[in-house]
Amino acid sequence: MKIAILGAGSLGSLLAGFLAEDSQAELMVHSKGDHGAMMVAKGLKIVGEAEVHIDANQALFTLDEIGLPEQINGSMDAILLTGKSNSIAPLSSLAQRLLRPNGIAVCLSNGLGHAETLVDALGPHRVICGTTTYGAWRPEPGTIHFAGRGTIVLGRLQDGPSQVDVQPLLDAFTRSGLACQWSEHGPAEVWMKVLLNIAINPIAALSGVKNGELLQPSLFSAALETMLEGARIARQERVHLPDDLALERRLQEVLQATSENHCSMLQDVRAGRGTEIAYLNQAVVERGERIGVRAPMNQMLSAMVEALTPSSNQH
């Protein structure tokens, strides 16, 4: 099975480290910048919860600044998009070039709208939803720190591929040691991840605290209200979600399980990088506006994060 990972930063490189161990997979890893150049030259090193080194000749490492060989056009059985949210549109165009007619594509990046972007580029018959809770960060170019095991959930979209169609990719994940499951309700899975992200990321980023500190009553109340605003909009879109009490319990569980984590948005703010707020809280606000449902907490948090990092406003 030929699998391409496009936008291989921390998450994509971590998945590449696992998938390269599957003898039945032919792997392409596409990245950019110093990290991508180091992988092309010397391969990929995984440290942390697993120690893995992938030689440069164990996969086809490609660099965005150089481009792709023509002979791989239309050859990929599956494509995983793992880049930052504002890179998904150009990566979708690249997927259109690489994916075979009956191949499968999935975006595992945080945020709303990525599956729709892929559908516009590839057609609904080649697109599934995806989320993941695997954790990774990059200490230096060419090296990924594996910070925490999680789960990959792949899910069905309306008019999209079935579990039978996706089974070869699920099997490749399983052979590689990645925990993976299938859902018949893809949009609900994406929305659940988004609800957690909109509740945790901006408040942790603005407060400068670890996830666990959001369990303090005042911060938790703000996080929960932000989450429930999003849930009201999702339900108006006919997305089936647990009730509010179950959502509250889920938020508490995640904050407890990730209590020592500094979320990615906090890391971005501290580094002066653009954030994914436009594809999280601001995207929730925009979806609410379309159906006449206000989301004032999400609007306020979005404005505050964008004021800290103006370059993040690239929706």
Image (cartoon, rainbow, N blue to C red):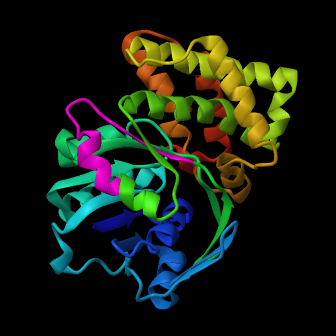
- What is the quadrant of the N terminus in the image? bottom left
Q: In this view, does 221 lie to the left or right of 141?
A: right
In the image shown, does 114 or 75 lie closer to the viewer? 75
Q: In this view, does 304 lie to the left or right of 236?
A: right
- What is the quadrant of the C terminus in the image? top left
* Image spot of residue 215 (x, y percent): 83, 29
Seen in the picture, residue 141 relative to 168 is either above or below; the reply is below
Q: Kindly tell me whether residue 93 is visible in this rendering.
A: yes
User: Is 154 colored magenta in this rendering?
Assistant: yes
Question: Which residue is located at x 64 percent, y 25 percent?
Answer: 300
In the image shown, does 131 or 65 lie closer to the viewer? 131
Seen in the picture, residue 12 relative to 121 is either above or below; the reply is below
Q: Is residue 111 left or right of residue 91?
A: right
In the image shown, does 89 or 252 lie closer to the viewer? 252
Q: Kindly tell me whether residue 302 is visible in this rendering.
A: no
Span shown in magenta? 151-169
Question: Which residue is located at x 69 percent, y 19 percent?
Answer: 248
* Image spot of residue 167 (x, y percent): 31, 50
Q: In this view, does 198 lie to the left or right of 205?
A: left
Farthest residue, direction left: 101
User: Is 139 colored magenta in this rendering?
Assistant: no
